[in-house]
Amino acid sequence: MNVSELKYHHVGIPADKPIEGEVYLKDYKCYHFGYETSEFGIEWMRYEKDCPLPELVKTVPHVAFKVNDILEAIKGRKVIIEPNSSSEGTVVAFIEENGVPIEFIQTVKKDAV
């Protein structure tokens, strides 16, 4: 995959305090807030103590990119969260690059998730 094929989506920043309006993601035991309303795609993420996500994702900000083919995007990379569907119509995966979590997001047809 060529870097020019990446399209910026958002930056996720770990938070340690509740934010009014945050949304709970039951499967991941975390809350998120903001990227839908931020003109720059700033997303705050707050994790419960027993959140199953990797410590790196819970403690280091991540940048997210839209990709056309998530399997191609993670091919040959250090995958820290395998492709999964966090919300209807999307598949996400995380890799580690130079000690930083990177998220890839692919939009998929409803019946392909």
Image (cartoon, rainbow, N blue to C red):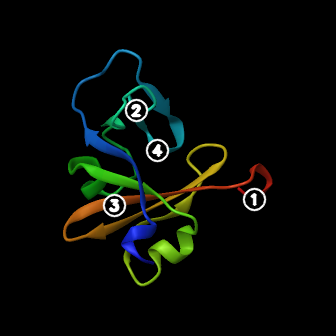
Q: Earlier in the sequence, mark 4 or mark 1?
A: 4
Relative to residue 105, is residue 71 depicted above or below? below
Q: Which residue is mark 4?
A: 28
Disc ID at residue 4: none
Residue 24, how many percent across, how many down? 47, 29
Mark 1 neighbour density, 10 Å: few (under 14) some (14–19) many (20 or more): few
Residue 40, how many percent across, how many down? 33, 36
Question: Looking at this view, is 70 or 84 the one in front?
Answer: 70
Q: Amino acid at mark 1?
A: Ala
Q: Are marks 4 and 1 in contact (CB under 8 Å)?
A: no
Q: Which residue is mark 2?
A: 31
- What residue is at 57 percent from the left and 65 percent from the top? 68
- What residue is at 76 percent from the left and 49 percent from the top? 110
Q: Amino acid at mark 2?
A: Tyr
Q: State the CA–CA distance, disc 3 to disc 4.
A: 17 Å
Q: State the CA–CA distance, disc 2 to disc 4.
A: 9 Å
Q: Amino acid at mark 4?
A: Tyr
Q: Earlier in the sequence, mark 3 or mark 4?
A: 4
Q: Which residue is mark 3?
A: 102
Q: Earlier in the sequence, mark 2 or mark 1?
A: 2
Q: Earlier in the sequence, mark 3 or mark 1?
A: 3
Q: On the rendered structure, is 113 left or right of 22?
A: right
